[in-house]
Structure formats: C-alpha cells, structure tokens
Amino acid sequence: MTTPTQAPPFPPAKVYALSTAFWQTKLIMTASQLGVFEKLSTGPASLEQLAEALTLQPTALHDFLDALVALELLERDGGRYSNSAEADFYLVPGKRYYMGHYLTFVDNFMRPTWDGLDEVLRTGRPQAPQPPERPQPEAAPGKEGTEFFEHTYASADLQRMFMEAQDSLSSEIAWEISRRIDWSRWTRLVDLGGARGNTAGILLQAHPHLTATVFDMPPIEPLFHEHMERLGVHDRAAYQGGDWFQDPLPEGDALLCGHALHNWTAEQRKTVIGKAYDAVRPGGVFMVHDLMIDEDRNRLNPLMLSLAMTLSVGGSGYKASECIGWMREAGFTDVEAVLLQDYDGHTVVLGHKRA
Ligand SMILES: C[S@@+](CC[C@H](N)C(=O)[O-])C[C@H]1O[C@@H](n2cnc3c(N)ncnc32)[C@H](O)[C@@H]1O
C-alpha cells in the first residue's frame, strides 16, 4: 500500500453515519421502552429526577439524555429536560397517535429479518424462520404472506401489537386520503384488508354521510369493534371476516385497499384487484394506496419496504404505473395515481367502474 500524500478528497461522514445509524434506532427504542417520554409528558425533569423516577443509574444517563436532545426528541432548558413537541405527540403512551407500538413492531418483527439480507440475496428466498413442514417458497410462491398473518393472529398479544402498529402507519395517510379526495360522490365504503378499521374510522369521522364495512381476516373482529367504539363510529361501521383469495368481497361504491398489496406477489395482487372490480358498484371507485416505488427507482423508503417484504413474507413493492396496468386490466377506467406523501412515496391509485 502506498502512503497517501494528500488528505482524502471528502470526509468519511457518510460511511460513518450509515455504519452507526443503529445507534439512533437504539436511542429512540430504549427511551420509549424505559418510559422517558411518558415521564416527561407530566412536566420537565432534571437528570436526577429522571434517574429516580425510572430507577436508572446516572453513569450513562447524561450522554443518553443529551443525545436525545441532539436528535430533537427532547429539549433541555438549564438542567431540565422536556419532550419535544413531536415526541410528546407520537411517543407518549395513551395518546391518540402514539407510535410506541410501531417501535415495538419494528424491533420484534422487522429488525430480525434484516439479518437474513445476505441470505435472501444469495438464495432469492424469504428468510423468515421456516419450520420443516412448511412448503418451500419455490413450490408455493406467496404462501409466506398467509403464514405470516396466520402466525401473527394466533396470539392475542401479537394480534394487538400488529394492529396498533398498523394504526401508527395508517392514521396520517387516512387523513390525507380524507382531505385530498372528494368523498361526497360515494356513500358506501369498503376497506379491504382494513385491519381493525383505523382508516375506515378516520374516514367515517371526517365524512358523516359514509357507512363502512371493513373486510379482513376473522380473528381481528373483536379488536375492530373495540376500536370503532373508541373512535365513536361503531353505529356506521360493520366487519366482514374472510379471505380475499377465497371469499366474495362486500359490495360498495368506494372500495379501498391500503398498505397491503406489497405483502403479496404480482399475481396475487392482480387476483385481489380483479375481485375488487366485481365488488365495486357501477359508477364506483377502487383505490389502492401504498408506498409505491417511483418510476426511476430513486426514492429510498419504498425500496427499503420492498426489500423488507422480500425478506420476510415473499412480497415486494411495486410502481404506480404497474398498479395502473393491473387496474386497467381488471376493467377500471380513468385510472390515475396521486402522490400523497413525498417523503415516503405513499401514493393512491384510483380507478373507476363505468356506471
Ligand atoms: C399491512 S396490513 C395493512 C392494514 C391497513 N390496510 C392499513 O393501512 O393499516 C395488511 C392487512 O391485510 C390483511 N390481510 C392479509 N391477507 C388477507 C386476506 N387473505 N384476506 C383479507 N385480509 C387480509 C391483514 O390481516 C392486515 O390487516
């Protein structure tokens, strides 16, 4: 190796930051799990007060708290810490838009599968733990999605954690869909794969003329009723349990399928879209929303979600143009894509059924 005679032309900042990005993940996860944001939601506290309230040793606490300030999750005034406005809104248990369950979901469901990235690149197969009796993915492409949901819904705790995490993801986008789309044209909403009804509930809250049916897998029904009560829309919301690959779908004039088709293969997505076409009443609409890959494949978040799906359930991301193609093939007309959020590529594709 020759001895360099010049300083490097650029600093190693990017390599350094990417290699240690998990430090930041660990900070937010740990602060959330230890109850830092919950404690500070009752008022500012000094390091000593936090140490006592959360039974923590002071050794690492000073750096931990100041690093959270640097991440803009906490604020520091004199010697006292408080939550930043964002942390107070999203990270305090019990608040409507609490995202702590999403952090737990990422930590428990998503993080471990990334250890299999090299394997999935080598083998092309999802790396979720496979019991020996499970059919090999090549023999049953897309089967992992079904197995993932069956496994998750077999436990009451996992069910609730998954539903609460989905709410964190769907709330912002539901408000966006509510605001950006003219709902006065339709009265009967059906949310396919609508989980415990968070999106439908937000749309019902915002548009009192709507009634809704949420179609999802049977085990979710009790959580749906509980959530609709909480949102105060239970009198206009119904649940239909079923499997969209096997069962007929409920009819409506505005069908929705959000943040769900990335769990499946392209062929499976086409099946769901085709069945949605049959269930949309003439003159009605079908909307698919998801983090969609941009045409030039430059936006990071949808590419990362796509990889996460390939790693875990054998699904993948897709482009709005592909979704438009599947919708046209199913029979929908005037199909168009509307970008809802630039930062993560969340897009809604709308297709109409002729009256
Ligand atoms: C990633 S979650 C998205 C939930 C919700 N649409 C949202 O935006 O938060 C996918 C949903 O699809 C549902 N799902 C998966 N397979 C299904 C099937 N075969 N039939 C009906 N629903 C299904 C799951 O139970 C889950 O609630």
Image (cartoon, rainbow, N blue to C red):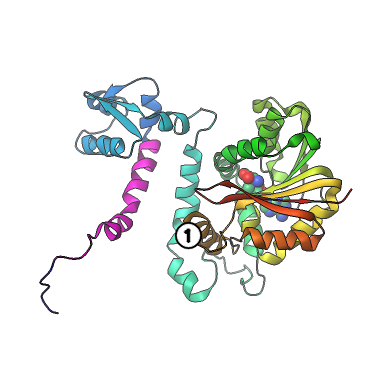
Task: Please tell me whether residue 19 belongs to the stretch shown in magenta.
Answer: yes
The residue under the point 54% across, 39% down is 168
Question: What range of the chain is rendered magenta?
Answer: 7-33
Position above or below: 318 against 235: below
Q: Main secondary structure of the magenta part?
A: helix
Quadrant (top left, top right, bottom left, bottom right) of the N terminus: bottom left
Can I make out residue 24 in this image? yes
Disc 1 secondary structure class: helix
Q: Nearer the viewer, residue 323 or 23?
A: 323
Left or right: 49 in relation to 83: left
- The x, y position of residue 35, in whole percent, is 38, 32
The residue under the point 63% across, 53% down is 149
Quickly name the residue at label 1: 113
Q: Which corner quadrant of the image does residue 190 belong to?
A: top right
Near mark 1 (Cα within 10 A), the count class, few <14, some 14-19 or many ≥20, is: many
Left or right: 84 in relation to 170: left
Q: How many marks?
A: 1
Outermost residue, bottom side: 1
The residue under the point 21% across, 33% down is 58
The residue under the point 73% across, 37% down is 182
Q: Please, what is the three-letter code of the amino acid marked with disc 1?
A: Thr
- The x, y position of residue 286, in whole percent, is 76, 49
Ligand 1 within 8 Å of the CB at mark 1: no
Can I make out residue 147 in this image? no
Task: Please tell me whether residue 176 belongs to the stretch shown in magenta.
Answer: no
- The x, y position of residue 177, in whole percent, is 65, 40
Left or right: 233 in relation to 111: right
Q: Nearer the viewer, residue 67 or 118?
A: 67
Position above or below: 77 against 317: above
- The x, y position of residue 65, in whole percent, is 27, 35
